[in-house]
Image (tube, rainbow, N blue to C red):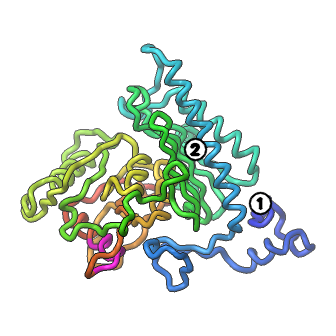
Amino acid sequence: MQFCYHCTQLIHADSVTSGHCISTFRNLLVPLRSSFSSSSQNTRKSPYRKAFTMDCPIPQDQLDEIYTFAIDLARKAGQLLLDRIDERNADQVYTEKENAVDLVTQTDEDVESLIKTAIQTKYPAHKFLGEETYAKGQSREYLIDEQPTWCVDPLDGTVNFTHAFPMFCVSIGFIVNHYPVIGVIYAPLLDQLFSSCLNRGAWLNEKRQLPLIRKPSIPPMPANAPSKCILGCEWGKDRRDIPDGNLHRKIESFVNLASEREGRGGKGGMVHGVRSLGSATMDLAYTAMGSVDIWWEGGCWEWDVAAGIAILLEAGGLVTTANPPDDISAPIAPVKLGSRLYLAIRPAGPSETETGRETQERTVREVWRRVRQLDYNRPGA
């Protein structure tokens, strides 16, 4: 079976030769192309987006239709979350998965069911990957392939939700050939909807283009970044008190970035502030908005980040690995979606001496100088 990007159906490969769909025939002859690096062939108008480029095999008009559908679906799912907030009582039941900070509620499962049913009804040939569905399986492998895939977190920030803390949201990402082309994030208690579609820009509530600060131009990253930056980070669900474990490595990295400039043996970053929103999805949304300058995180999953990465990249941000490579001066590789290791930099414009991209890459390397390697190895990623 082959997926037809023209008629969005699964068909037998031999049927294209009998005239089923000439567009599919061309797609079978020409492999899908995806470039997760700067490309001289990039025809996008935005001067800021160079980290991830691709020739999307789905026509733009169909992407636009899927985008509209995803926005409507996110609002419906968000309304269900609001309804559950209104209905809840002090005896609300939730289940612990790995530990006391890794929770699932009936609301998580009900919202995922609503989203999954709507997607499978509208787009039966598309694949679906949701947090709650995946969590019930035994495998922890990366399952996304080249086929059009919906990657959904029905309720990111479940702990926040159980405390009625407003930083929780619905996250809906649409991925083609491992690349997030559409992202929709809706935080219903804040009534903030972040969205993007390939070639259509990134938006807050469909009216305000991201990043928010654009006049007279998008500001570059600070000359001495990470100093003067807002750092977003999370404690994560791995709370094991293991010497040199992930929790200890994160804490050391946080302290390095927060300490006085060139303190900590030269690793002090003197960031303006550290923010932990309790939701990786909201962290990315606020980075796309320009409210968070740097987001460094390990341990979350593709449904936590797919929509946010789509939005951030369309806004002009950069995303790479959280773990510093052996040679931090080497070209900066784009993030692997299922790696569970993420370093995101907000959209940035040019300074007097650098392009916006150069200010972002400089910031990446300065963060890498100050953080520890995290251990989140995963099959297939």
Of the numbered discs 1 and 2, the one sitting upstream in the chain is 1
Residue beneath disc 2: 130
Please tell me whether residue 139 is drawn above or below residue 87 in the rendered image: below
234 above or below 325? Answer: above
Tell me where residue 217 appears, x and y as whole percent: 36, 69
Residue 135: x, y in percent? 52, 40
Instruction: Single out the mark in the foreground, 1 or 2.
Output: 1
Q: Secondary structure at mark 1?
A: loop
Instruction: Say which residue appears at 50% left-offset and 82% top-offset.
Output: 39
**Does the magenta portion include 48?**
no
| Type of amino acid under label 2 | Gly
Q: Nearer the viewer, residue 230 or 279?
A: 230
Q: Secondary structure at mark 2?
A: strand
Where are the magenta residues, as a range?
A: 354-362
* Residue identifier under label 1: 8
Q: Amino acid at mark 1?
A: Thr
Q: Which residue of the protein is positioned furthest toward the right in this rendering?
A: 18
The residue sitting at 67% across, 52% down in the picture is: 127
